[in-house]
Image: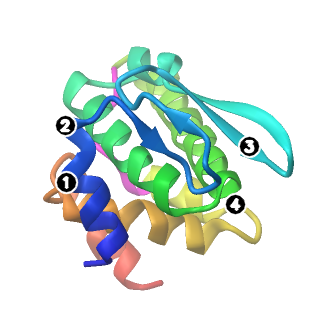
């Protein structure tokens, strides 16, 4: 496993302070994290995602996004969160249920992001699997093996 991912995983439960790749600090226990994209200050907002997912999935997503925030560029992290939230919203609208696991539909939506799709998918899956790979539908791993 990548050493930066290992370090981020080890810190998750013990720290109320994290630093994004560009030096911006944030509290990973909060639902809004500041980031900088091309000099513009933006935020990763998890509030709407909390309402659309089960509690275990929400917790795992925040763990994965902490790893992304600390190890990837801010644009990839921001785009990935927007895509995952849009997928959760679509799931909620279609089934009137909170999303309980990552499905192939989520991965397809991530993959369809223009030039960043494959990098974004890889960036999400690597820390996800480092956390044990649960809360992901079985067919997802078979699906992503083809790409």
Q: Is residue 141 left or right of residue 37?
A: left
Badge 3 element:
strand
Q: Residues within 10 Å of mark 1 (few under 14, many from 20)?
A: few
Quick check: is 8 in the magenta stretch?
no
Q: Which residue is mark 3?
A: 36
The spot of residue 69 in percent (x, y) is: 51, 50
Badge 4 element:
loop
Q: Residues within 10 Å of mark 3 (few under 14, many from 20)?
A: some
Q: Residues within 10 Å of mark 2 (few under 14, many from 20)?
A: few
Magenta stretch mostly in which secondary structure? loop
Q: Which residue is mark 1?
A: 10
Q: Nearer the viewer, mark 4 or mark 1?
A: 1
Would you identify the image quadrant in which residue 90 lies? top right
Calculate the distance from the C-alpha at mark 4 to the C-alpha at mark 3. 20 Å
Colour option used: rainbow
Determine whether label 4 and label 3 are within 8 Å by CB.
no
| Total marks placed | 4
The spot of residue 119 in percent (x, y) is: 58, 72
Depicted 123 relative to depicted 145: above or below: above
Q: Which residue is mark 2?
A: 14
Magenta residues (range): 98-104
Calculate the distance from the C-alpha at mark 2 to the C-alpha at mark 4. 33 Å
Q: Earlier in the sequence, mark 2 or mark 4?
A: 2
Badge 2 element:
helix
Q: Which residue is mark 4?
A: 113
Give the quarter of the figure containing the N terminus.
bottom left
The spot of residue 129 in percent (x, y) is: 23, 64
Determine whether label 1 and label 2 are within 8 Å by CB.
yes
């Amino acid at each position: 496993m990548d050493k930066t991912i290992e370090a981020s995983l080890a810190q998750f439960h013990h720290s109320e302070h994290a630093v994004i790749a560009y030096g911006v600090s944030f509290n990973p226990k909060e639902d809004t994290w500041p980031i900088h994209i091309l000099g513009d200050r933006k935020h990763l907002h998890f509030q709407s995602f909390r309402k659309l997912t089960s509690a275990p999935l929400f917790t795992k997503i925040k763990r994965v996004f902490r790893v992304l925030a600390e190890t990837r560029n801010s644009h990839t992290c921001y785009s990935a969160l927007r895509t995952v939230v849009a997928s959760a919203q679509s799931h909620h609208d279609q089934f009137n249920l909170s999303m309980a696991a990552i499905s192939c539909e989520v991965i397809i939506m991530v993959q369809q992001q223009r030039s960043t799709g494959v990098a974004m998918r890889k960036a999400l899956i690597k820390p996800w699997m480092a956390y044990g790979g649960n809360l992901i539908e079985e067919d997802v791993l078979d699906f992503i093996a083809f790409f």
